[in-house]
Image (tube, helix red, strand yellow):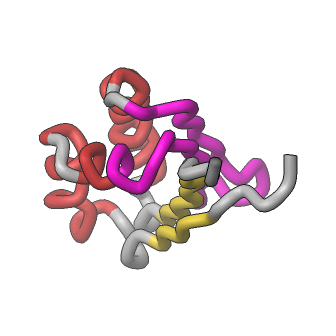
Amino acid sequence: MENKQVTVIARVRAKQGMEETVKNALLSLIEPSRADEGCINYDLHQDPGNPALFMFHENWTSEEALNNHLATPHLKAFIEKADKLLADPLDVSLWKVISN
């Protein structure tokens, strides 16, 4: 049986002076996202050498579960204000596990 799990790497760079605001906004996504159906993990990381850089490492049971997550109010609300907070557009890539 094919593994339908999807891994997401999402990179975020805060505008200068907005690092704490972005950090708090990203942290507020964790609890509701982890509660979304199909979420395996939803972990936020921050670059220790550059506090403006953040990365989500996420795993979802399927692309359908990920798409449902992307349509949630909590994620849509963040995306709506992203232009004001972020120096660059969201950098999101999808990955499939090929080893066990």
Q: Is residue 97 left or right of residue 15?
A: right
Instruction: Using the image, determine if residue 19 lies above or below residue 83.
Output: above
Q: Is residue 39 left or right of residue 7?
A: left
Q: Which residues are magenta?
A: 38-66
Instruction: Using the image, determine if residue 85 lies above or below residue 100.
Output: below
Instruction: Using the image, determine if residue 30 lies above or below residue 70.
Output: above
Q: Is residue 91 magenta?
A: no
Considering every residue shown, the one lying at the far bottom of the view is: 88
Residue drawn at the location 42% of the way across and 26% of the way down: 34
Residue drawn at the location 48% of the way across and 68% of the way down: 92
The reply to whether residue 52 is in sight is no
Instruction: Using the image, determine if residue 79 lies above or below residue 87.
Output: above
Considering every residue shown, the one lying at the far front of the view is: 1
Q: Position of residue 67 (x, y in %)?
A: 29, 54
Q: Is residue 1 left or right of residue 78?
A: right
Q: Is residue 63 magenta?
A: yes
The reply to whether residue 73 is in sight is yes
The image quadrant of residue 11 is bottom right
Q: Position of residue 36 (x, y in %)?
A: 32, 29
Q: Position of residue 77 (x, y in %)?
A: 15, 48
Q: Nearer the viewer, residue 82 or 59?
A: 59
The image quadrant of residue 55 is bottom right
The image quadrant of residue 82 is bottom left
Q: Nearer the viewer, residue 40 or 44?
A: 40
Residue drawn at the location 45% of the way across and 62% of the way down: 14
Residue drawn at the location 36% of the way across and 66% of the way down: 86
Considering every residue shown, the one lying at the far right of the view is: 100
